[in-house]
């Protein structure tokens, strides 16, 4: 699976718009992820057609010192999406 993650400012309408547009350009196998820290996945992905591939993957700050990412599924997120994202996040290396 491929992952698309956005990191725009914390404004619900902007995040929803980004995901609505992106969904038109990527295949159904692409995971859609938001790095939101205060918006719930059900709101962020409310306008996405294929919500089973959506989740929040929010890095703990500062990410270059704390190698931890919070994964929060949408109520419709399938297990394979959570597993693939977890695998990807554990493989990411921070280099100096």
Image (spheres, rainbow, N blue to C red):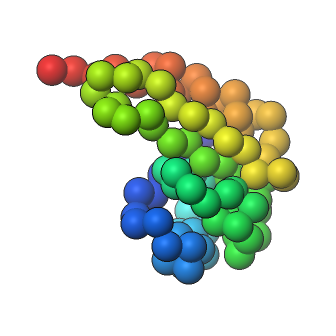
Asked which quadrant contains residue 12, the reply is: bottom right
Q: Is residue 22 visible?
A: yes
Q: Camera-side residue: 70 or 30?
A: 70
Q: Residue lying furthest left in this view?
A: 96
Q: Is residue 36 left or right of residue 92?
A: right
In this view, 93 is above or below 27: above
Asked which quadrant contains residue 73, the reply is: top right
Q: Residue at x 58, y 23 (%)?
A: 87
Asked which quadrant contains residue 21, the reply is: bottom right
In this view, 31 is above or below 61: below
Indicate the position of residue 86 as horizontal and vertical percent values: 61, 27
How many marks do you count on the picture? 0
Indicate the position of residue 16 as horizontal and vertical percent values: 59, 74
On the rendered image, what quadrant is the N terminus found in?
top right
Q: Is residue 18 visible?
A: no
Indicate the position of residue 69 as horizontal and vertical percent values: 51, 31
Q: Residue at x 64, y 65 (%)?
A: 44
Indicate the position of residue 62 as horizontal and vertical percent values: 32, 33
On the rendered image, what quadrant is the C terminus found in?
top left
Q: Residue at x 62, y 36 (%)?
A: 71
In this view, 5 is above or below 49: above
């Amino acid at each position: 699976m491929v992952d698309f993650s956005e990191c725009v400012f914390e404004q619900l309408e902007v995040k929803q718009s980004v995901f609505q547009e992106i969904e038109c350009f990527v295949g159904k196998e692409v995971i859609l992820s938001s790095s939101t820290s205060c918006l719930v996945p059900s709101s962020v992905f409310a306008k996405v057609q294929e919500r089973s591939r959506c989740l929040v993957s929010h890095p703990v700050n500062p990410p270059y010192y704390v190698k931890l990412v919070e994964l929060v599924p949408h109520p419709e997120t399938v297990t394979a999406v959570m597993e693939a994202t977890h695998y990807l996040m554990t493989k990411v290396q921070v280099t100096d």
